[in-house]
Amino acid sequence: MPVNILMPALSPTMEKGNLAKWLKKEGDKVKAGDVIAEIETDKATMEVEAVDEGTIAKIMVPEGTADVPVNQVIAVLAEEGEDASAAAKAAPTAPKPQVASAPKADAPKPTPAPQAAAPVPAAPKANGSGGRVFSSPLARRLAKDAGVDLSRVSGTGPHGRIIARDIESAKSGGAQMRAPAAPSGGTMPGISVPSDDQIRALYEEGSFESVPHDSMRKTIARRLLESKLTIPHFYLTADVDIGSLLRVREEINATAPEKDGKPAFKLSVNDFVIKAMAVALQKVPDANATWTEGAMLKHKHSDIGVAVAIPGGLVTPVIRQAEGKSLSAISNEMKDFAARAKTKKLKPTEYQGGTTAISNLGMYGVKDFAAVINPPHATILAVGAGEKRAVVRDGEVVAADVMTVTLSCDHRAVDGALGAQLLAAFREAIEKPLSLMA
Amino acid sequence: MTFNFSMQAIDQIVNSAAKTLYMSGGQVECSIVFRGPNGAAARVAAQHSQDFASWYAHIPGLKVVSPYTAADAKGLLKSAIRDPNPVIFLENEILYGKTFPVPKLDDYLVPIGKAKVVRPGKDVTILSWSIGMTYALEAAEELAKKHIFAEVIDLRTIRPLDMATIIESVKKTGRCVTVEEGWPQFGVGSEIAARIMDEAFDYLDAPVKRVTGEDVPMPYAANLEKLALPNAAKVIEAARAVTYR
């Protein structure tokens, strides 16, 4: 039996992904565990491993194909002893069997199969071949009764069939809902936005370059629009004195033990900010929360997301249980996250969830700003540049190292006074950095 | 004598018994009960291990009854004898050795044409009769441990089918698995699947699945005979397929 290799779901919410690269070609032998392809999701590039042993009989989705739905057949594997070309012919969604795909037959033209077998990008809504949505009769009836649009539900049944439980979870607003019809998150019901053509008409033809959105851009647009439309934000700003922080930091870095001829760690101001936020959330646990319609989720740990700018967008890896980690551990974890974020090698589990986030634009000289809350968090801390400022201390004007931070709060979960308590706890932690060493 | 030998008299059963009332314009009744062991016993090979349920259920003019419990066997046999029509009464040799409680009543009757919900459930309907019920009930017990709650229905009568009970259950569960020892092609499960599709299409969340005997003459070798017959594992597999779990 030829084995179908399906587009994997790399995270529970993944609906489609880009097939970035094939590492094996038709006719190649693979064994279980071999990396056969690279899949690109909104924020990461992941490797697909072969589960079975055999020969790649046919590649159904060529590399570089965008928006391949989860569970779509991406290749066919002929098992041991099977004729690879026969398996290729038996490939399920091949529009027409390709006779010339046996590996040894020199095909006269360089690209025989892939083009015929790429019906994918044209039909993003279809969960099966042929451009239609497959759903069970019961699912269709339930969807009709509930007013759920089937094209927005992703199916979890065989071949992506939409089954009754998918409708149930779509009704309860679960993760099975696809992005609204415009996947860029461009529109919400009841709000009219100018069409693409209307916007283009404002600019002279040829005066701009049109760059299609990649999946990260679409995700950023959708999530942050959702955040601003559904979360009542309010903002609290404070100046914090980082004089002793800078002194402590210098001292610690100067005495860092050496490992392989290099210091074992080099703490940044941001590492202190992460730790201080983690400690502050533990002191004000009511602010370490997530709003859901049914209940308030009160988190036990401080899982701090840290926004990392990467080419074309940003990603927010999460330092889990940061309250219990040492500054050097946080620092090294952050360095690893930042490096892997830039090459899109973060795993979804590393950037999903979290209980708050930190966005630091200090290195660009930004004095202060307000950040958009990254759902499901209830808060985000926007950190400006540390700079020498004139402050009044004991009735005298003196120079001090000051940094302005702004806490954005979800008013549904964190009220004004509670947010202020959190910010005060943060300020106390960061102004007394030795308390972070405990 | 088992039902395997009824083929010697199948002309009398199909052409005479089943059609007499019709061809006499309703003037001549044919009140006969044909009873005997049906289906596979154990190691009696291809010619003596056949399930005739779908054969006789195919014929208008016949009633086909096949009990699982001793109480149903008693109550249905009495009803069959009292019925004015020819009734095929399919018993199972292996079930002869199984003990069931039987109510002590003077005149205990079980009506022909009534299925029985033996085990209520909400996730999948498992339909069977006769010895198939042992696999169905064993499977339901195992499935419950995996939090799949199967509703098990004992058809008891194959013709006429109690579609009302079947449809009511399938509308509730949205999924159906049939279990029979007979061959898959044109079997009782096939007919039930077609009728469910007709009457409860909008309630189905998965295709109806049949668990049947394998599509081969019954092997004599004990190991192959075991493989050719349905069992609880096959029923569990089918139930998990239709519940997508």
Image (cartoon, coloured by chain):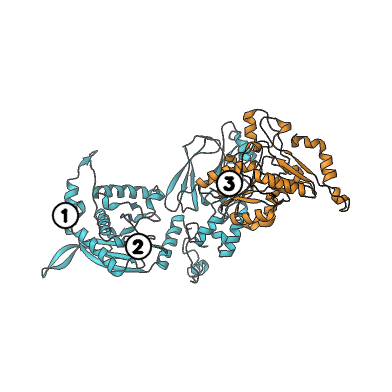
State the residue at coordinates (84%, 41%).
Answer: B12
Give the Cα distance between marks 1 and 3.
67 Å
Tags 1 and 3 both on a single chain = no
Give the Cα distance between marks 3 and 2.
43 Å
Element type where label 1 sits in the image: helix
**A41 or A164: which is nearer to us?**
A164
Element type where label 3 sits in the image: helix
Q: Quadrant of the N terminus of chain B?
A: top right
Q: Which residue position holds label 2?
A: A378
Q: Which residue position holds label 3?
A: B239
- In the rendered view, tell whether residue B59 sits above or below residue A179: above
Question: In which image quadrant can residue A141 be found?
Answer: bottom right
Tags 3 and 2 both on a single chain = no
Which chain corresponds to the colour orange? Answer: B
Mark 3 falls within which chain?
A: B
**A21 or A130: which is nearer to us?**
A130
Tags 2 and 1 both on a single chain = yes
Amino acid at circle 3: Ala
Q: Residue A404 placed where, x, y %?
A: 24, 64
- In the rendered view, tell whether residue A272 sits above or below residue A22: below
State the residue at coordinates (73%, 47%).
Answer: B78
Give the Cα distance between marks 2 and 1.
32 Å
Q: Residue B158 placed where, x, y %?
A: 71, 47
Q: Nearer the viewer, mark 1 or mark 3?
A: 3
Amino acid at circle 1: Arg
Q: Residue A133 placed where, x, y %?
A: 59, 56
**A357 or A280: which is nearer to us?**
A280
Mark nearer the N terminus (2 vs 1)? 1
